Image (cartoon, grey):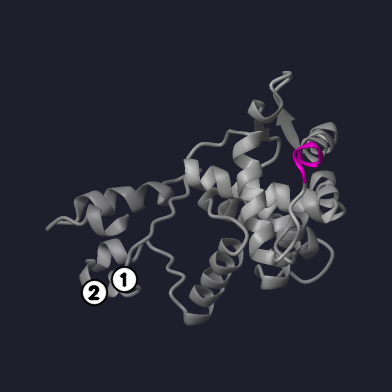
């Protein structure tokens, strides 16, 4: 957070950004600030001269688009950075075959599709309606309880509530146990090995982000 490194003589920022300019240096420093005109507004020339600032509106807009697009699929900032990294790799690979170019939204979209494509996601998309509702019920229960583990009974209660909202008939207890068993068999769920039935504990075997992505059009 570049704003917090400001001092009256600006020695801290100068030394920080001077390191990458040293001969044979392999250091790259990325800094962020809440204001786009920070170099012009508060930095001495000797500090500002050592910065390469992506301050153009087009670059800022593309950065925002990446975050908005990823935020619709995931709440994890690290996932956003992973996607940006992969988009850069895709762009670099494409540039080897033709004229070099900068990262475009097309590269980001390709990275997103690649990152969120897996046999598990395809299995969710091909699951039955009540199997998908069961997965939604798991997410709802995790959010309610604040932990990523629940009993089948707790998930069943969420499942019934979702069915009521959709005006659908709820499955029976035996049907919900069969649904849980099938999802466990294809490794979408980790199901406790027990004869406790409704009191068995279940966890997702994939990330919540992947489940939400797979069900986003459902």
Is residue 88 visible to the viewer in this orientation of the structure? no
For mark 1, give the secondary structure. loop
Q: Which mark is residue 35?
A: 1
Instruction: Tell me how far mark 1 sits from mark 2, CA to CA.
Output: 9 Å
Residue situated furthest bottom in the rendering: 57
Q: Which residues are magenta?
A: 172-176
Q: Residue 4 placed where, x, y %?
A: 23, 54
Residue lying at 72% horizontally and 28% vertically, measured from the top left: 191
Between 9 and 152, the residue placed more toward the observer is: 152
Is residue 144 visible to the viewer in this orientation of the structure? yes
For mark 2, give the secondary structure. helix
Residue situated furthest top in the rendering: 194
Q: Quadrant of the N terminus?
A: bottom left
> Mark 1 near mark 2, Cβ–Cβ under 8 Å?
yes
Return the residue at label 2: 41
Q: Residue 8 placed where, x, y %?
A: 12, 58
Q: Residue 190 placed where, x, y %?
A: 72, 30
């Amino acid at each position: 957070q570049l704003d917090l490194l400001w001092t009256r003589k600006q020695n801290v920022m100068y030394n920080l950004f001077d390191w990458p300019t040293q001969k044979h240096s392999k250091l790259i420093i990325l800094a962020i600030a809440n204001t786009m005109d920070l170099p012009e507004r508060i930095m001495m020339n000797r500090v500002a001269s050592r910065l390469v600032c992506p301050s153009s509106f087009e670059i800022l807009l593309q950065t925002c688009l990446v975050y908005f697009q990823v935020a619709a699929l995931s709440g994890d900032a690290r996932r956003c950075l992973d996607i940006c990294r992969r988009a850069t790799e895709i762009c670099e690979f494409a540039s080897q075959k033709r004229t070099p170019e900068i990262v475009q939204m097309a590269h980001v979209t390709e990275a997103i599709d690649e990152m969120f494509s897996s046999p598990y996601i395809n299995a969710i998309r091909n699951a039955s309606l009540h199997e998908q509702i069961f997965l939604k019920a798991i997410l709802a229960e995790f959010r309610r309880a604040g932990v990523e583990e629940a009993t089948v009974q707790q998930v069943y209660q969420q499942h019934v509530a979702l069915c009521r909202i959709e005006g659908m008939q709820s499955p029976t207890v035996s049907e919900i146990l069969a649904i849980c068993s099938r999802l466990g068999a294809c490794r979408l769920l980790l199901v406790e090995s027990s004869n406790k039935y409704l009191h068995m504990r279940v966890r997702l075997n994939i990330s919540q982000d992947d489940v939400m992505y797979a069900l986003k059009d459902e």
